[in-house]
Image (cartoon, rainbow, N blue to C red):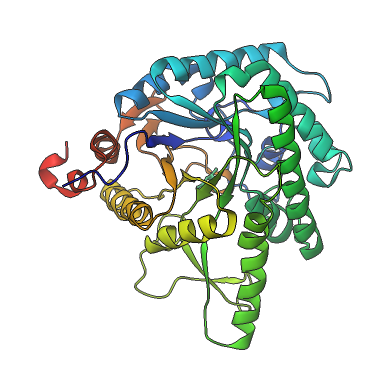
Amino acid sequence: MPRQFPDGFLWGAATSAHQVEGGNTNNDWWDFEQAPGTSAGESSGDGIDHVHRYADDFALLAALGHNTHRLSLEWSRIEPAPGAYSAAAIGHYRRVLTAARDAGLTPFVTLHHFTLPRWLAAAGGWLAPDAVDRFARYCRHVTAALGDLMPFVCTINEPQMIALHGYLEGYHPPGRTDPVLWQRVGRVLLHAHHAAVRAVRDAGGGRCGTGLAVQLPLLAPARDDDACRTLHRLLQAEIVDLYLDGLHGPDRGDWLGVQYYRKQWVDPAVPGRFADPPAGVQRTQMGWAVYPDGLRQMLHHAAARTGLPLYVTENGIATGEDTERVDYLHSHLTAVAQALAEGVDVRGYLHWSAFDNFEWAEGYRPTFGLIAVDRDRGFTRIPKPSAHTFARIAATGRLDVAIDPRAQP
Ligand code: FCB
């Protein structure tokens, strides 16, 4: 069987600083975790202690066949007070990115993955009048200091989820439920992306390719009636197409990160606007519906609306049954292979996640990792069978190696 993924395809996994590092006490998420009455179930605490274990973690991922790794820089460490940049934090991230590169993992670096420095959150977060300027300044500072180690710079992770979860649904900070703010913040984040692209280009001297990472759920009306169709149109516009159609002009970036998890059914009769998946549809620990062809469809949609080269920057499943992860990997990589065969320019696949980690308001309960972490026994890393499946696919560029049971370790 010929290769289904080209030579040079990027294979890796993703994390974000607050979900793995531990001890991120100076951002809005930490405060949200500690505050009474929020949706956060537990504190991120020590994370998986990646802040100290990054070098061993990168060696393990390289041994498991990864050639890239996506991680995020923690803004609140780098700029603990407005305009006061920490040389120690920059030094830390220089060591982190150097360790990744030296392990053979091309660094794929996110500049903002959900967490805001406490001082910016106190000033109004993304609604503060100077939020975009502040972000651009941080991006410029980081790129001037670390640009030689950042061939891929992802400006913002999932602007639409920051807006939706934080300002409409209220279960991420700042916990607002205001439709006007929801729509406003999404547009601010799009401006912030453009400003970040400019900042990285100015400070990076052409070394850093930039992109936005958008989550693109496959949305569908729950029923074929006017009310469902109307809400579906609104959510499709505000969650998906606003961001894709906003990527035009000189500051749109060089590529697009597509993050896909699930299909969602829109229903105005349901309090949360999204209905439970229909009976019989496979659900994950998050309650999310598994629907692999949605990834193929959303890759087509993203390519058609933007014309940009694509990287799958997140895709994965929360499950305690690792055989489900093996199946999920296989079915979703099949969707990527089909999109490639149909002419979509997809250049890499980064699984969510490398490790079981802190899943925001859900805490440590959902397990998304290719690698388990025993947080009670010295943060021991334990690769799951799916990590070996992933390694075989990455090494061969073929999917038939993944379902052959003899190929399982
Ligand atoms: C995405 C986030 C990522 C992780 C996965 C499960 O929305 O970008 O941090 O929480 O979902």
Query: To which quarter of the image does residue 29 belong?
Result: top right
- Which residue ends up furthest to the bottom in the rendered image? 225
**Residue lying furthest left in this view?**
406
- Quarter of the image that includes the C terminus: top left
Residue displayed at 28% across by 51% down = 330
Asked whether residue 171 is in view, the answer is no
**Front residue of 129 and 277:** 129
45 horizontally vs 60: left or right:
right
Residue 278: horizontal and vertical position, in percent? Answer: 42, 75
Q: Say if 334 sits above or below 88 in the image.
A: below
52 versus 262 height, above or below: above
Name the residue at 57% across, 24% down.
150
Q: Who's the residue at 45% across and 71% down the image?
A: 277
Above/below status of 35 relative to 186: above
Counting from the top left corner in percent of width and height, residue 38 is at 68, 50
Q: Position of residue 408 (x, y in %)?
A: 16, 40
Where, by quadrant of the figure, is residue 109 drawn? Answer: top right
| 310 left or right, relative to 409 | right
